[in-house]
Image (tube, helix red, strand yellow):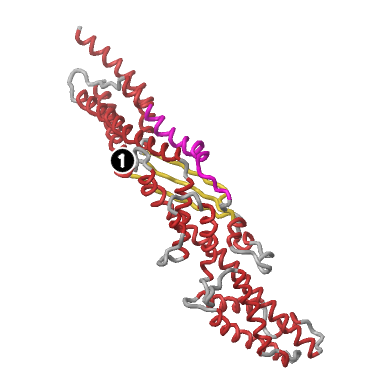
């Protein structure tokens, strides 16, 4: 019977040592979250023109929601820093350091939406203008075929205008692009379209003069102005950054009057529009975060560190007592003791309670996302005491079985002593 008890003792020592080590070896806190971004709401950050109103961004992307996830961990040293819930430290160690991952992930759908929207604007603008000119030349020639039929016959199909828009997009998005440099590319494209239409033999392009080309250029310039891409000196803002420009402007309006230093809301000279937008989003989250968030974070950090020390001590105490009893010749049975069960129960609360708290209660204290394209924000926090808590649960049936063998061993020991 004593041999059986010693085997059980070894199992108890393994569990207690593993629990004590895992309390400090595992990340003190593991954070997981999911943010759902509504595509239709997000597409509003690209200004609507007569050419974009008919496009459904959700249909173009193949989804109406973009799910973004972020996972990060805090070790013992980082957890120690955020005790007390000091705003600057919590912002540095948790929010700013890790929000950048969300923002970086957000870049892909932003770029996709921007590309779809701007290409659609350019493509629709050019197709509309060329069709109008071909229709005018067709009527002057007296051809019975429609402008669309003539254009399809000479290869001016959807693919043609898609390539047309990409060439123009690249020209407008290049470094140092101006309205004049874009016009040069457009001139070339228009000349190609005119030459193609003449191949049909059904148009009279004699009315397609330099003045007509100028009208097309002015129309395109009007679209670019509607998109607020033309600077006062005729230079163009990068088209690929238009969504970031509107996001940053929206956030700036939201934060005006809510920050101590208004200069933080201005774009720095050495800051790209993407970097500026990222910084504004981080500033928005930090500014809107309620004080209760920092209080909860501070108390959670304190509870984790103090709890780890206390729980570690009780597990080590169980290991030492069991080790001493195992090498004892006469009384090899160990005991768990009331403090083990009391503190173990508290460990369960801390281990699983925090996960429940953050999943079901903390979302109620998250900042308002009014005006932002965020439809859902879910998060879950797991602490380093979760696995030791599971080991504690294993100890419950183990202790019950152990008590049976221990009782029998004590009885036999008493009988032998008589």
Horizontal relation, residue 327 to residue 280: left or right: left
Using the image as rendered, state which of residue 60 and residue 264 is in the foreground: 264
Using the image as rendered, state which of residue 227 and residue 146 is in the foreground: 227
In this picture, is 347 found above or below 226?
Answer: above
Q: Quadrant of residue 387?
A: top left
In this picture, is 164 found above or below 120?
Answer: below
Total of numbered circles in the picture? 1
Q: Quadrant of residue 28?
A: top left
Crowdedness near tag 1: few (<14), some (14–19) or many (≥20) residues, C-alpha within 10 Å: some
Horizontal relation, residue 218 to residue 390: left or right: right
Residue picked out by circle 1:
80
In this picture, is 393 found above or below 375?
Answer: above
Horizontal relation, residue 96 to residue 77: left or right: right
| Visible residue check, residue 386 | no
What range of the chain is rendered magenta? Answer: 346-370
The secondary structure making up most of the magenta span is: helix
Q: Quadrant of residue 121?
A: bottom right
Using the image as rendered, state which of residue 294 and residue 17 is in the foreground: 294
Residue 373, image x and y in percent?
A: 57, 53
Q: Assign the C terminus to one quadrant of the image.
A: top left
In this picture, is 95 found above or below 266?
Answer: above
Q: Tell me the residue at 55%/82% (across/down).
A: 180
Determine the secondary structure under disc 1. Answer: helix
Q: Tell me the residue at 60%/76% (across/down).
A: 165
**Residue, far top:** 418
Residue 312, image x and y in percent?
A: 28, 32
Q: Tell me the residue at 27%/24% (across/down).
A: 4
Residue 351 included in the magenta stretch of the image: yes
Residue 290, image x and y in percent?
A: 47, 41
Residue 36, image x and y in percent?
A: 55, 51
Horizontal relation, residue 116 to residue 147: left or right: left
Residue 202 included in the magenta stretch of the image: no
């Amino acid at each position: 019977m004593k041999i059986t008890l010693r085997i059980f003792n070894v199992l108890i020592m393994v569990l207690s040592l593993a629990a004590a080590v895992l309390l400090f070896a595992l990340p003190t806190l593991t954070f997981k979250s999911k943010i759902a971004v509504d595509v239709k709401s997000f597409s509003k950050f690209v200004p609507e023109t007569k050419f974009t109103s008919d496009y459904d961004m959700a249909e173009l992307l193949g989804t109406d929601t973009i799910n973004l996830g972020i996972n990060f961990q805090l070790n013992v040293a980082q957890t120690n820093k955020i005790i007390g819930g000091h705003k600057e430290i919590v912002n540095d160690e948790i929010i700013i350091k890790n929000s950048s991952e969300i923002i970086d992930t957000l870049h892909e759908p932003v770029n996709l939406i921007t590309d779809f929207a701007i290409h659609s604007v350019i493509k629709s603008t050019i197709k509309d203008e060329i069709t109008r000119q071909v229709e005018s030349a067709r009527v002057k020639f007296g051809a019975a075929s429609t402008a669309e039929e003539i254009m399809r016959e000479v290869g001016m199909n959807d693919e043609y205008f898609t390539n047309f828009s990409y060439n123009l997009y690249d020209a407008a998005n290049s470094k140092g692009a101006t309205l004049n440099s874009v016009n040069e590319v457009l001139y070339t494209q228009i000349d190609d379209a005119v030459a193609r239409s003449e191949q049909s033999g059904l148009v009279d392009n004699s009315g397609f003069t330099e003045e007509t080309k100028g009208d097309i250029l002015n129309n395109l310039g009007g679209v670019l102005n509607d998109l607020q891409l033309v600077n006062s000196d005729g230079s163009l803002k990068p088209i690929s950054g238009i969504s970031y420009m509107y996001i940053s402007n929206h956030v700036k309006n939201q934060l005006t009057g809510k920050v101590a230093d208004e200069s933080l809301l201005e774009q720095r000279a050495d800051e790209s529009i993407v970097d500026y937008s990222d910084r504004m989003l981080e500033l928005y989250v930090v500014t809107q975060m309620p004080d209760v968030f920092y209080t909860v974070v501070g108390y959670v950090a304190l509870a984790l560190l103090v709890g780890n020390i206390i729980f570690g001590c009780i597990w080590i105490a169980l290991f030492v007592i069991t080790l001493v009893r195992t090498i004892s010749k006469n009384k090899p049975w160990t005991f768990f003791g009331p403090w083990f069960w009391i503190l173990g129960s508290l460990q369960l609360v801390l281990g699983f309670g925090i996960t429940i708290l953050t999943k079901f209660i903390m979302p109620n204290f998250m900042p308002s996302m009014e005006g932002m394209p965020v439809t859902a924000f879910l998060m879950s926090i797991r602490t380093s005491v979760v696995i030791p808590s599971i080991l504690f649960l294993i100890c419950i049936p183990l202790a019950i079985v152990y008590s049976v063998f221990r009782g029998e061993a004590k009885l036999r020991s008493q009988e032998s002593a008589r």
